[in-house]
């Protein structure tokens, strides 16, 4: 039996056309990704995602390439296995 899992409710982000380049507002991106504004800005500040560009009124915009990189980062999966099993002994109380 095949199961389908929907991770987020994807609503299309609406582009803003400036000089024939499509840009997307940060608020639409983090809303689409179902991450908080704080998480999104932390990713940005830490250099995990592109920084974007300022537009009128201080709004931050991202181009299509940056949007793709942000989506890729947000959808990244990492293994849950500990890197060093000896280190896990310290957290579990074993010696």
Image (cartoon, rainbow, N blue to C red):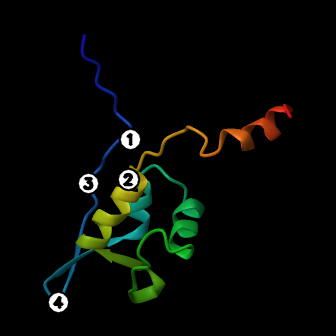
**Relative side of 41 to 18, left or right:** right
Q: Disc 1 to disc 3, how far (Cα)?
A: 12 Å
- Mark number, residue 19: 4
Name which residue lies at 59% across and 46% down.
83
Badge nearest the viewer, 1 or 3:
1
- Mark number, residue 12: 3
Q: Disc 2 to disc 4, how far (Cα)?
A: 25 Å
- Contact (Cβ within 8 Å) of mark 1 with mark 4: no
In this view, the residue in front, 25 or 3, is 3
Q: Which residue is mark 1?
A: 8
Give the mark, 2 or 4, whose residue is nearer the N terminus: 4
Quadrant of the rendering where the N terminus is positioned: top left
Give the mark, 2 or 3, whose residue is nearer the N terminus: 3
Give the mark, 2 or 1, whose residue is nearer the N terminus: 1
**Relative side of 58 to 94, left or right:** left
- Mark number, residue 59: none
Q: Secondary structure at mark 3?
A: loop
Name which residue lies at 25% across and 72% down.
65
- Contact (Cβ within 8 Å) of mark 4 with mark 3: no
Q: Which residue is mark 2?
A: 32
Q: Disc 1 to disc 4, how far (Cα)?
A: 32 Å
| Residue 22, quarter of picture | bottom left
Name which residue lies at 38% across and 37% down.
7
Which percent across, then down, holds residue 12? Answer: 26, 54
- Contact (Cβ within 8 Å) of mark 2 with mark 1: yes
Which percent across, then down, holds residue 68? Answer: 28, 63
Give the mark, 4 or 3, whose residue is nearer the N terminus: 3
Q: Secondary structure at mark 4?
A: loop
- Contact (Cβ within 8 Å) of mark 2 with mark 4: no
Which percent across, then down, holds residue 62? Answer: 33, 75
């Amino acid at each position: 039996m095949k199961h389908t899992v929907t991770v987020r409710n994807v609503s299309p982000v609406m582009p803003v056309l400036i000089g024939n380049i499509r840009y997307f507002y940060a608020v639409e991106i983090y809303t689409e990704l179902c991450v908080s504004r704080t998480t999104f800005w932390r990713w940005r500040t830490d250099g995990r995602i592109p920084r974007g560009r300022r537009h009128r009124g201080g709004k931050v915009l991202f181009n299509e390439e940056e949007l793709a990189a942000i989506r890729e980062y947000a959808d990244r999966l990492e293994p849950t296995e500990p890197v060093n099993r000896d280190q896990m002994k310290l957290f579990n109380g074993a010696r």
